[in-house]
Amino acid sequence: MAEDTTGQEDIRWAPRVPKHKIRRLYEWESKGILDEELIEDVGFMLLLRCQAILTIRDAREGRVKCPRCEREGATTIVPRPQERGPDARMECDRCDWAITWGAYHKTYQHKQLHSGGAVAAFETYVKAYGRARTPKAKILAIDRLIHEFHYSLRTDPDQPTRPAAVNLIQGKLTDVARFLDELTYGEAATAELESRRREWRDTVDRIPWMALPAREPADGSDSEER
């Protein structure tokens, strides 16, 4: 029997941001240059990505947003049926959009769209970016977001499990972590950016299975005493 994919054609999830855009943003910032167009581009892409992640979080909790109505500027919530199997069917009363839960699930499966233990980070960014009125405020919001982490929700809420950037930036988890660790920070970087960079690396070091190359001291001296 052919799989029912009806309704999938209306669903489009925002993609992750390419590394080269993030890299260029930080290279310019390290020189004291705020490229407003680039900041807006990256910031808005991250906003759409966070909104997609939160939309899926809501759907998993039973509140499915109709994508067809959304394109028309309306917000319609389609309740997820009590019967939670893949064949459970959801229908929008406003526009007749319909899809099975199994078909809906496959639209975001294996696309790093699961909110996991970083829900607060994604929610905070959506609010912060909406309030940001200057390029500096926007780049600070971007920097906070991409240096956030997922945390263990069940066993140890204070234990980081992986960088949240893997949900936001293109690439495999280890590649994204290495990419963030190698971002360019120049003399013009604000104290807040520098502080967050150090905190991010310290947090990465608390994740047992992650191993990044040792950082060289800023003065170029050997890291160990001779």
Image (tube, rainbow, N blue to C red):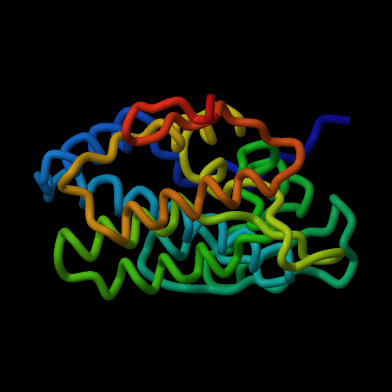
Residue 66 vs 127, above or below: the answer is: above
Residue 37 vs 128, above or below: the answer is: above
Q: Position of residue 198 (x, y in %)?
A: 45, 50
Instruction: Give the camera-side residue of 18 and 103.
Output: 18
51 left or right of 202? left
Instruction: Give the camera-side residue of 33 and 6.
Output: 33
Q: Position of residue 192 (x, y in %)?
A: 31, 61
57 left or right of 145? right
The residue at the point 81 percent across, 65 percent down is 156
The residue at the point 41 percent across, 72 percent down is 74
8 left or right of 142? right
Instruction: Give the camera-side residue of 222 and 197.
Output: 222
The residue at the point 47 percent across, 73 percent down is 75
Residue 142 vs 15, above or below: the answer is: below
**Mark count:** 0
Q: Splitting the image into 4 quarters, where does residue 93 fall?
A: bottom right
Residue 221 vs 75, above or below: the answer is: above
Residue lying at the far front of the rendered structure = 226
The residue at the point 21 percent across, 40 percent down is 186
Q: Quadrant of the N terminus?
A: top right
Residue 55 in sight: yes
Q: Position of residue 191 (x, y in %)?
A: 27, 59
Residue 12 in sight: no
Q: Splitting the image into 4 quarters, where does residue 125 fall?
A: bottom left
Q: Position of residue 195 (x, y in %)?
A: 38, 57
